[in-house]
Image: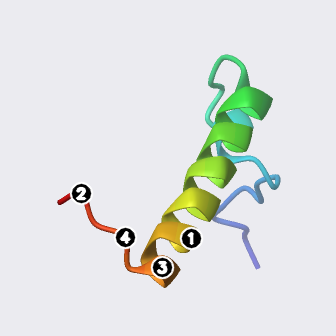
Amino acid sequence: MKQDYTEGSDNIFKDLGSANPEEKLAKAELIFIINKIISEKGITQT
């Protein structure tokens, strides 16, 4: 069976050839964690 895709790594930014992929992944993970905490605490901007 022909493979129609390429298996990626754990870093989408690296797979896309982005500059500084480790830094971008770390920032994305941090944003995810912060967003989760904000949602759990019900914090709003008002």
Q: Nearer the viewer, residue 25 or 13?
A: 25
**Amino acid type at image mark 4:** Ile
* x and y, in percent, of residue 15 in the image: 70, 40
Pointers 1 and 2 in contact (C-beta within 8 Å): no
The residue carrying mark 1 is 37
Q: Nearer the viewer, residue 30 or 7?
A: 30
**Spatial CA span between label 4 and label 3:** 5 Å
The residue carrying mark 3 is 41
Q: Quadrant of residue 39?
A: bottom left
* Secondary structure state at the residue bearing disc 4: loop
**Spatial CA span between label 1 and label 2:** 14 Å
Horizontal side of 46 relative to 22 (left or right) equals left
**Spatial CA span between label 1 and label 4:** 9 Å
The residue carrying mark 2 is 45
Pointers 2 and 3 in contact (C-beta within 8 Å): no
Pointers 4 and 3 in contact (C-beta within 8 Å): yes
Horizontal side of 31 relative to 29 (left or right) equals left
Mark 3 packing: few (<14 Cα in 10 Å), some, or many (20+)? few
x 81%, y 55%: residue: 10
* Secondary structure state at the residue bearing disc 2: loop
